[in-house]
């Protein structure tokens, strides 16, 4: 039982560190937030999207999805970013169809 509590405490502590690593306060980054808004915040804080992560269309070279750093399945997407030190960060997002916004689910 004590081992399980320690593992949970370590996981929670790790999640707090991940959220603290993202620009702004943890209150500013929440599930359901527009990915476009979060993306603008990350860019403003000097983060770089990993434009080689997402898929590109063969003929035009344009991103297959709305953002070059995003790779999607049927409903969920993952965006990869690098902070100013070059460390990689992933953001899980819910895919937006047609004119719907992509929405933040979690940060990893």
Image: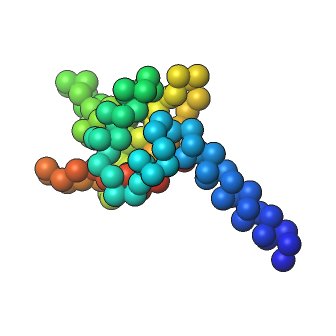
Residue sitting at x 56%, y 23%: 86
Residue 55 visible? The answer is: no
Query: Looking at the rendering, which quadrant does residue 61 occupy?
Result: top left
The picture places residue 62, in percent across and down from the top left corner, at 23, 27
- Left or right for 70, reference 107: left
Q: Is residue 12 visible?
A: yes
Q: Residue furthest left?
A: 99
- State the residue in front, 68 or 1: 1
In-image side of 100 versus 103 (left or right): left
59 and 97: which one is in front? 97
x then y, percent, for residue 68: 33, 32
Give the vertical position of 23 relative to 62 (above or below).
Answer: below
* Residue under the image location 37 percent in, 52 percent down: 104
Q: Position of residue 100 (x, y in %)?
A: 18, 53
User: Residue 28, how many percent across, how many down?
Assistant: 41, 47
Residue occupying image coordinates x 37% and y 27%: 43
């Amino acid at each position: 039982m004590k081992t399980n509590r320690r593992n949970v405490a370590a996981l929670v502590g790790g999640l707090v560190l991940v959220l603290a690593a993202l620009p702004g306060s943890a209150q500013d980054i929440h599930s359901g937030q527009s990915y476009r808004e979060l993306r603008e915040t990350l860019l403003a804080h000097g983060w770089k999207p990993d434009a080689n992560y997402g898929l590109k269309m063969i003929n035009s070279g344009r991103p297959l999805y709305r953002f070059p750093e995003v790779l999607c399945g049927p409903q969920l997407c993952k965006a990869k970013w690098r902070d100013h030190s070059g460390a990689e960060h992933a953001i899980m997002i819910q895919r937006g169809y047609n004119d719907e916004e992509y929405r933040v689910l979690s940060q990893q």
